[in-house]
Amino acid sequence: MVMTTAPLKTIPLLENGDRLTRHEFERRYTAMPPQTKGNPKAELIEGIVYMASPLRIRSHGQPHSQIVTWLGFYQANIPSLIVGVEPTVHLDMDNAPQPDAVLFIPGRGATIVEDDYIAGAPELVVEISASTVSIDLHDKKEAYRRNGVQEYIVWRTLEREIDWFSLQNGAYIRLEPDENRVIKSQVFPGLWLAVEAMLSGAMSDVLAVLQAGLNSADRID
């Protein structure tokens, strides 16, 4: 008598455009060969898998580093905060984005859970947006709004525009620069952004304006 065994079921590959639950998305992502994880970056937005194209330096890598420098300088003055670069965020059952940067007060809207992911909504999320503008300003923006992300920054690098949205009464309102072309956070005291300086890469000016904001602000405990 010949014994036969049923073939082992393989876990399907993660594909761009798949419609999945967050648990199935993470199951497939975890099963990917080690050399492919994170390349390309994979996110689940409103139940749809998005896998990023290769990233260019001027339209993404450089502005990404500028935003991280700005947020890192702020966090260095307020150590109770956490800055994250491209962390996976468990927003809800249909959304596991990997934003370019986050800033949050641990234990409020977002927490770090046992598996070292972020669960919940960081107070501030930043996306560097070149080829992803349509996602960042629509489906991703809606997911962040619905889950209570208090402030959302989209740097549209090809258009040389920075959109800073503030969640007010359940809707995102675009914050406008003041007469000095500075946008001031409604959530983090002293988090000031010199828009033109950031767009032109004048980081010494960006950090000088941020330091002025820190000097003027009440501190976060």
Image: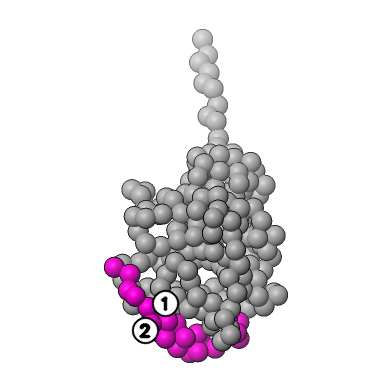
Q: How is the image coloured?
A: one colour
> Which quadrant of the figure has residue 201?
bottom right
Which residue is at the front of the view, 174 or 126? 174
Q: Which residue corresponds to the image point at 60% horizontal and 46% vertical from the top-left?
A: 46
Q: Secondary structure at mark 1?
A: loop
Residue 169 location (% of width, % of height): 54, 55
Question: What amino acid type is highlighted by mark number 1?
Answer: Gly
Residue 28 visible (yes or no): no
The span picked out in magenta is: 195-221
186 or 96, which is in the foreground? 186
Q: Main secondary structure of the magenta part?
A: helix
Within 10 angstroms of label 2, few (less than 14), some, or many (20 or more) residues?
few
Which amino acid does the dot numbered 2 rest on? Asn
User: Which residue lies under the disc numbered 1?
Assistant: 190
Q: Please tell me which of labels 2 and 1 falls first in the chain.
A: 1
Residue 192: image x %, image y %?
Answer: 48, 78
Q: In the orientation shown, which residue stands out farthest toward the top?
A: 1
Left or right of residue 148: residue 161: right
| Labels 2 & 1 near each other (Cβ < 8 A) | yes
- Whether 149 is drawn above or below 3: the answer is below
Could you tell me if residue 82 is visible in this image? yes
Q: Residue at x 69, y 74 (%)?
A: 158
203 w.r.t. 143: above or below:
below
Residue under label 2, please give it: 215
The magenta stretch spans residue 205: yes
Left or right of 38 on screen, residue 214: left
- Classify mark 2: helix, strand or loop: helix
Residue 183 x %, y %: 54, 77
Say the numbered circle drawn on residue 112: none
The residue at 40%/73% (across/down) is 189
